[in-house]
Image (cartoon, grey):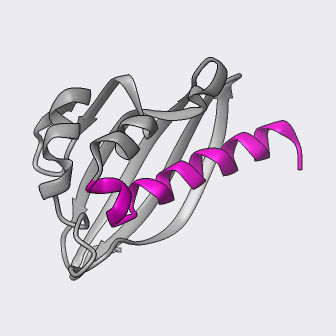
């Protein structure tokens, strides 16, 4: 596996961990995967920062082990620059289909790959 492919795979692995209810419900575990400068624009249009996301993530959909879980598909990624990966993918959560775009940044030392930016867009029923 070449370096670019490995970096993309590391970002995808981080994305999948962030969909795990055990990670989503833990400020400590989720905090390891979000960059301190993290920003998200959610499907609702709301802007989220690192602190706001960590505070509210346990109450977000997909964060409870006994509720519907994210079903991801169509992962695609590209290395934008050394230590910077852009991913796109889709998820289903119950009947809600969402398209995602995220940028992952490799931190220094043990920090590893962390999500720097995330955008989610809800897909209306009937849209390809």
- The part of the image, by quadrant, that contains residue 32 is top left
Q: Which of these two is toward me, 103 or 128?
A: 103
Q: Which of these two is toward me, 124 or 35?
A: 35
Residue 99, image x, y percentages: 35, 59
Looking at the image, is 98 positioned above or below residue 79? Answer: below
Say whether residue 123 is left or right of residue 5: left
- The part of the image, by quadrant, that contains residue 70 is bottom left
Say whether residue 2 is left or right of residue 110: right
- The part of the image, by quadrant, that contains residue 84 is top right
Residue extending farthest to the right is 1
In which quadrant of the rendered image does the C terminus lie?
A: bottom left
Residue at left offset 22%, top offset 61%: 122
The residue segment tinted magenta is: 1-25
Residue at left offset 37%, top offset 55%: 23
Q: Which of these two is toward me, 78 or 67?
A: 67
Residue at left offset 28%, top offset 75%: 65
Whether the magenta-drawn stretch holds residue 17 is answered as yes
Say whether residue 22 is left or right of residue 40: right
């Amino acid at each position: 596996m070449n370096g670019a492919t490995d970096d993309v795979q590391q970002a995808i692995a981080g994305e999948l961990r962030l969909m795990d209810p055990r990670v989503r419900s833990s400020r400590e575990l989720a905090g390891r995967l979000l960059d301190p400068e993290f920003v998200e624009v959610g499907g609702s249009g709301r802007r989220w920062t690192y602190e706001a996301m960590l505070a509210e993530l346990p109450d977000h959909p997909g964060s409870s082990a006994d509720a519907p879980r994210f079903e991801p598909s169509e992962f695609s990624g590209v290395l934008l620059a050394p230590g910077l990966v852009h991913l796109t993918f889709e998820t289903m959560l119950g009947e809600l289909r969402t398209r995602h775009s995220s940028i992952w940044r490799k931190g220094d030392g043990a920090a590893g790959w962390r999500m720097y930016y995330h955008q989610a867009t809800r897909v209306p029923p009937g849209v390809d």
